[in-house]
């Protein structure tokens, strides 16, 4: 066999392997970007809704605003849809209930319940935590002293990319403007 033919086959094989590796890398990055975008979109959606709700806690409420406050659940009153009727809003994270509709073992349901309507809003998150602050900025567990609510949220993609679940985090302290202090 001719040395030039052998060299041509070797160079062609190396070039073909390089092209295949580049193609696999592009697909992997594309998948990772898609999963990263999914995590960010879920985080932004939840963040927008909970920020809106918490800012309106106490709106058109004559009595107590918060009925339940814990690290994973908050229930409060406010006219959140501006129809003149006081609504009861609950945000509840079920860290002990796994989600079967995703491949991510860290996913748990986060519910938004308005006036006992459990189908109102449910999303999937991997971390959700609430902290409460009084007027002096100290942590409080007394619903009557709450002036600020810190929300920590992490959402991961529903499936893995190279063994990893792309994640997006959000944290904010909300100070409802309608509290009767």
Image (cartoon, grey):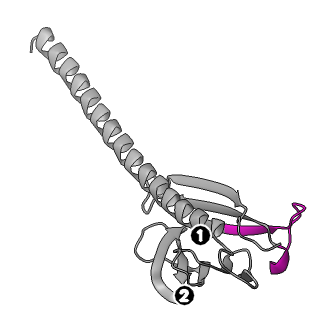
The picture places residue 51, in percent across and down from the top left corner, at 60, 63
Relative to residue 175, is residue 37 depicted above or below? above
Q: Quadrant of the N terminus?
A: top left
The picture places residue 150, in percent across and down from the top left corner, at 72, 63
* Side of 26 where 159 appears, left or right: right
The residue that appears at 45% across and 50% down in the rendered structure is 36
Instruction: State the residue position of label 1.
Output: 53
Residue 142 in sight here: no
Instruction: State the residue position of label 2.
Output: 115
Q: Nearer the viewer, residue 5 or 15?
A: 15
Q: Is residue 10 magenta?
A: no
Q: Is residue 139 magenta?
A: yes
Relative to residue 126, is residue 98 depicted above or below? below
* Side of 180 where 21 appears, left or right: left
Q: Earlier in the sequence, mark 1 or mark 2?
A: 1
**What is the magenta range?**
129-145
| Mark 1: few/some/many CA within 10 Å (<14, 14-19, 20+) | many
* Side of 1 where 98 appears, left or right: right
Relative to residue 110, is residue 20 depicted above or below? above
The picture places residue 180, in percent across and down from the top left corner, at 78, 74
Residue 170 in sight here: yes
């Amino acid at each position: 066999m001719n040395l030039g033919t052998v060299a041509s086959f070797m160079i062609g094989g190396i070039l073909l392997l390089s092209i295949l590796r580049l193609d696999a890398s592009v697909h992997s990055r594309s998948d990772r970007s898609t999963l990263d975008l999914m995590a960010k979109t879920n985080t932004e959606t939840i963040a927008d809704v909970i920020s809106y709700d918490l800012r309106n806690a106490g709106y058109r409420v004559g009595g107590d605003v918060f009925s339940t406050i814990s690290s994973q659940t908050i229930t409060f009153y406010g006219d959140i849809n501006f129809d003149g009727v006081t609504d009861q809003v609950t945000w509840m994270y079920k860290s002990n209930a796994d989600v079967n509709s995703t491949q991510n073992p860290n996913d748990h349901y986060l519910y938004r319940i308005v006036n006992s309507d459990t189908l109102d809003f449910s999303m999937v998150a991997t971390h959700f935590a609430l902290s409460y602050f009084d007027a002096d900025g100290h942590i409080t567990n007394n619903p009557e002293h709450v002036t600020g609510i810190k929300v920590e949220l992490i959402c991961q993609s529903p499936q893995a990319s190279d063994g990893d679940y792309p994640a997006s985090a959000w944290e904010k302290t909300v100070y409802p403007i309608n509290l009767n202090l």
